[in-house]
Amino acid sequence: MSAPKRILLLGSGFVAGPCVEVLCRRQENTVTIACRGLEKAQSLASKYPGVLAESVDVSNESQLEDAISRNDIVISLIPYTHHASVIKAAIKARKPVVTTSYVSQPMLDLDQQCKDAGIICLNEVGLDPGIDHFYALKMINSVHEEGGQIKSFLSYCGGLPAPEDSDNPLGYKFSWSARGVLLALMNNAKFWENGSIVEIPGKELMASAKPIYVNPAFAFVGYPNRDSTNYKERYNIPEAQTVVRGTLRYQGFPEFVKALVEIGFLNTDNQEFLSSASSETYTWNQLTSKLLNSNSSTSDDLLRIIESKITAEPALKKRILNGIRWLGVVSDSIQVKKQGTYLDTLCARLEELMQYEPGERDMVALQHTFEIINSDGSEETRTSTMLEFGIPNGESAMARTVGIPCGIATQLILDGAIQDTGVLAPMTKSIYEPIMNELLKDDIYCVEKVL
């Protein structure tokens, strides 16, 4: 057996379980799950033999440094805003770090210090970012090695309920904060299209969604992520005329969100009457009446005003109005749970209605589409596609496709199979190929086709 290895995992969220499971496959590993609240760490640790639990407050510098110093590697699955603090403590202890988050500027600023300490801080080894990088680079490098060029690169990924569990007006369920999901829908987007940079303001993002064909069984639509322009450089495809990375949702999702914006529900301004200090109580029809400045709070009157605000073709408008009824925001019998803003109050309602129930499955869909110019001048389209489904009453597809590659990357660093140093993402074969190859053992892979 190999020498004993001690692994510190910060965080106990839903992706932590599959990561721990991977690391527990090796008898020489001892995993310690650390959270600020010991109970959370103990709850996850109890599911795996030999896994330890510890209370660590990452905002306490000395406590964090002590915990990291007692281990051989640290995995940070806590919010990305804490990663720089974790890396600084790891540099001091000369211990490598793994995260599934995008490399932020505060993390990148520590690159030279990581190199000087002889350690790697490996990031973006989850799903998106992560598996998407592996299969994008696999195809791009293969095309380049054959003397070809990438004319266009489109990449769409989405975490969704499986079709049988998607029957609500948004075709969506929340496995994390509804607020985070909705706020992301108002980000500006920027990408390359036909040799020019296109920018879409956040308020027009949902209107920019268009059908994305992945599989004949699914009615997907996609809209662009924040900024895809730097992927020409990240993926070494300066020749590409179109580069778009985006998000997949089911048909109808963007229009329904757009309607919520038009009604005013995504307003993030603090409202005194919605604060916990306010003694006023509201039913949902009263709150919606207030939002719409309506003299009436009857369901029919509110729906008439809402209909006048929605810009959609008649059949779709009818579906949206049915969805508004389903949400209960024109009901005179459902009490409002005040959360300070219209957005957060709506999110509390959405989270009541749209959680995964026992036995329900989620689904992850990822597809890259490459328009290729071959060395002989001929052109072809290739795709790289992954569909993963959650296990009823078991791990979700999202947890597996984020947590398993993270665990594999950690093990490869411990084994010395990845020896790079610095603050890195998996952009080189020396990093992404071994992770991708190990993922095959867990049946996680993309299927490549020539169209």
Image (tube, helix red, strand yellow):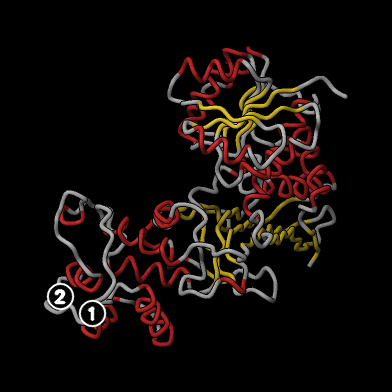
Of mark 1 and mark 2, the one earlier in the sequence is 2
Q: Is residue 380 visible?
A: yes
Looking at the rendered structure, the secondary structure element under dot 1 is: helix
- Binning the other alpha carbons within 10 Å of mark 1 as few (below 14), some (14 to 19) or many (20 upward) gives many
Query: Element type at marker 2?
Result: loop
Q: Position of residue 23 (x, y in %)?
A: 73, 35
The C terminus appears in which quarter of the rendering? bottom right
Picture residue at 68% right of the left edge, 30% below the top: 31
Residue 102 to residue 239: above or below: above
Question: What crowding class fits label 2: few (fewer than 14 Cα within 10 Å), some (14-19), or many (20 or more)?
Answer: some
What residue is pinned by disc 1? 302
Q: Report the front residue among 80 and 360.
A: 360
Q: Position of residue 331 (x, y in %)?
A: 28, 77
Quadrant containing the N terminus is top right
Please say whether residue 236 is visible from this viewpoint: no
* Residue depicted at x 30% and y 72%: 329
* Mark 2 lies on residue: 294
Q: Residue furthest left?
A: 295
User: Residue 16 falls in which quadrant of the image?
Assistant: top right
The residue that appears at 53% across and 69% down in the rendered structure is 210
Tell me the quarter of the picture where residue 72 sits.
Answer: top right
Q: Are marks 1 and 2 in contact (CB under 8 Å)?
A: yes
Horizontal and vertical percent for residue 158?
Answer: 59, 59
Image point (14%, 55%), residue name: 279
Q: CA distance from mark 1 to mark 2?
A: 8 Å
In this view of the protein, which residue sits in the foreground, 425 or 408? Answer: 408
